[in-house]
Image: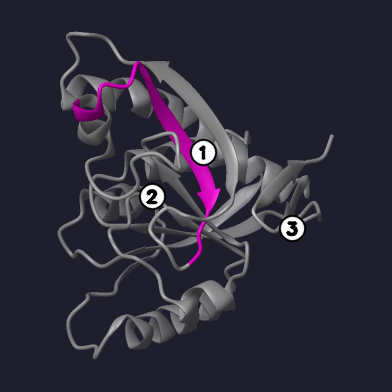
Amino acid sequence: MNTSKNPCVLAVLVSGNGSNLQVFIDKIESGELNAHIACVISNNPDAFALSRATRHNIPVVVHENRGFKGRREYDAALVKILNDYGVELVVLAGFMRILSDVMVSAFPNAIMNIHPALLPSFPGLHAQQQALEYGVKFSGCTAHFVDCGTDTGPIILQAVVPVEPCDTEEILSARIQVEEHRLFPEAVRLYIDGRIVVEGRLVRIQS
């Protein structure tokens, strides 16, 4: 938790396009978010998100999956990178790996993710398609802290969007993404302002 007036030091972990990364960059540069992105880390050397970071002179680190015996060894190396950059809060913006206890214990209640569904419904991949196939009338997105499970950590904020009869996975994803871009920075802002209290699974937002 960063309750000082100094910018909160973030690392953004990505595997793909990085649209949420771009939102964070824009809000920090505009002064809307009191944070500093120390580095952008990807397990995918071809992630377009790395180009986004480079354009804004943000250090990038490619931390590929290969060469490690398992998740815990990979995460131990990841923790070292994050500590070397003095990171306070880790933001997962489309990072396609499940973190182990090594990473979670190093940053307790200091790793945030955005998921394109109303958790605990439809965790994991292709959440939008899961929602369509199940026939729900509403979906949305969830900002949550990360634990060792798949999208099972304490819920910080949620936003709801309608599911229309003509929706495809792509159309629903685009509608949800609008809310992601609003919700995720707000969850980080609450963290930076010291307004989040975690009690077991319950996240309380202080006024």
**Residue at 50% across / 26% down in the picture?**
159
Q: Is residue 70 something that shows in the picture? A: yes
| Residue farthest toward the right in the current orientation of the protein | 207
Q: Is residue 8 magenta?
A: no
Residue at label 3? 2
* Residue 10 versus residue 160 in the image, above or below: below
Sequence-earlier tag: 1 or 3: 3
Residue at label 1? 184
- Residue 172, position in %: x, y? 26, 22
Q: Nearer the viewer, residue 83 or 182?
A: 182
Q: Nearer the viewer, residue 69 or 89?
A: 69
Q: Quadrant of the C terminus?
A: top right
Q: Residues within 10 Å of mark 1 (few under 14, many from 20)?
A: many
**Residue at 40% across / 70% down in the picture?**
99
- Residue 58, position in %: x, y? 41, 57
**Contact, mark 3 vs mark 2 (Cβ under 8 Å):** no
Disc 2 and disc 1: Cα gap in Å? Answer: 9 Å
Which amino acid type is shown beneath numbered disc 1?
A: Phe
Which numbered disc, 1 or 3, marks the residue closer to the eye? 1
| Residue farthest toward the front in the current orientation of the protein | 134
* Residue 2 versus residue 183 in the image, above or below: below
**Residue at 73% across / 59% down in the picture?**
1
Disc 1 and disc 3: Cα gap in Å? Answer: 17 Å
Q: Residues within 10 Å of mark 3 (few under 14, many from 20)?
A: some
Q: Which residues fall within the magenta stretch?
A: 133-147
Q: In the figure, residue 132 lies in which quadrant?
A: top left
Label 2: element kind: loop
Disc 3 and disc 2: Cα gap in Å? Answer: 20 Å
Which circle marks residue 93 in the picture? Answer: 2
